[in-house]
Amino acid sequence: MDRSIIVVKLGGTEGLDYSSVCADAALLIQSGKRVILVHGGSAEANDLGTALGHPPKFITSPSGYTSRYTDQKTLDIFLMAVNGKVNTRLVEELQKLGVNAIGLSGLDGRLLEAARKETVQSIEGGKRRVIRDDYTGKIERVNSGLLQILIENAYVPVIAPLAISPAGEALNVDADRAAAMVAAGLEAEILILLTAVPGLMSCYPDESTLIRSLPQNRLPEALEAAQGRMKKKILGAEEALKGGVRKVVIADGRVKQPIQQALLGEGTVIQ
C-alpha cells in the first residue's frame, strides 16, 4: 500500500469551513499528495428532517455513546442530505478547484461493508429499551482495492458515511469510524479528524486545556473522560492506529488551511 496517503474526515457539525478544507486539499493534491476525504452531514440531516416533519432522534447506549436513531424514514432523509447534498457539494467545490473528485458512498462497489445491528439498546428515563428497526451498522470490510484503482488513476475519492449490509441494505455508519477504517484499509500515513474545536481538551470546552500530544496507550483513559462526539473520534483514532495508520490528528476545521495545520501538528496528535 501507498503509505503517503492522507485521509481527512470532515465533521458533520456546524462551524466547519468546507471551502477552506477543499481549497487546502486542492493545494496538497496539486503538490502531489494523495488525499481521500470522508465526510459527515449531521447538521444537514437534522435540518432536512425537521423541515420534513421528522426531526432527528438520538439514542444513548448503556455504555454512554450517543447515536442517531435511524428508522427507514430517517435513513431516507440521511441519504438525501448526506449522500445527495453534502457529498455532491464537496465534489462540486473540488471540481471548481481543478481536482477530479469522485463522490462515493459505502454502497458503491461495496466500498464499505457492515453488519447491521439486529437490536440496539437505548437508555430512556433510566430504563433500558431494545430497538429493532434501526438501520445502523459497524463496518467490517473496506474495498481498498477500489480506492487504490481510483487513486492510481488520479481520482480523489469523497466518501459519504453509508455502508452496505451482506443483504444489500443501506446502513448509516459513524463517519469518524468510517474514516478510520478507510485509513486502516489503505495503511495510510495519517488520519486527520477535523472538527469544530481545536482538538481534545482536558477540561472541555476550555480551549486553553488543549491536549497537544497523546500516546496511543492513553486512549482508553481519554475515552473514559471524553464527552459526546469526541468519544467516537477517540474510538476512530484507536481503530486507525491498531489498523496500521502511523498517526492520527484531531484538529480544528474552522481555521484557514486546516489540513496543512494538522500536518504541522496543530491539534491533538495521537501516535
Image (cartoon, rainbow, N blue to C red):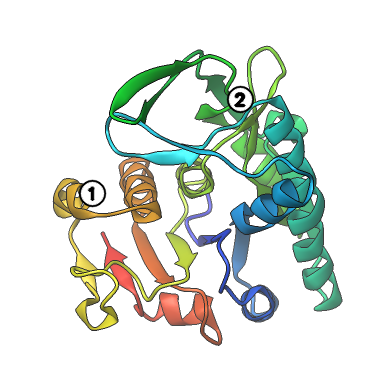
Write down the residue under mark 2: 135
Which residue reaches farthest front?
Answer: 125
Indicate the secondary structure of the residue bearing disc 2.
loop
How many other residues sit within 10 Å of disc 1, few (<14), some (14-19) or many (≥20)?
some
Q: Residue at x 55, y 19 (%)?
A: 116
Q: Can you say whether 145 is above or below 13 in the image?
A: above
Q: Is residue 115 left or right of residue 219?
A: right
**Which residue is located at x 75 percent, y 43 percent?**
53
Q: Measured along the vertical axis of the image, is residue 137 above or below residue 242?
A: above
What's the CA distance linking mark 1 and mark 2? 25 Å
Q: Is residue 197 above or below residue 120?
A: below
Q: Is residue 82 visible?
A: no
Neighbour tally class for label 2: few under 14, some 14-19, many 20 plus, Cα within 10 Å:
many
Q: Secondary structure at mark 1?
A: helix
Q: Is residue 192 left or right of residue 73?
A: left
Q: Position of residue 24 (x, y in %)?
A: 62, 80
Query: Which residue carries the number 1 mark?
Result: 223
Residue drawn where x is 55% and y is 39% of the image: 57
Between 252 and 247, the one nearer to me in the picture: 252
Image spot of residue 210 (x, y percent): 25, 76
Q: Nearer the viewer, residue 152 or 102?
A: 102
Amino acid type at mark 1: Leu
Could you say where residue 153 lies in the image, as x and y percent from the top left?
A: 77, 54
In the figure, is residue 151 to the left or right of 249?
right
Please tell me which residue is depicted at 53% across the width and 14% down the height of the picture: 132
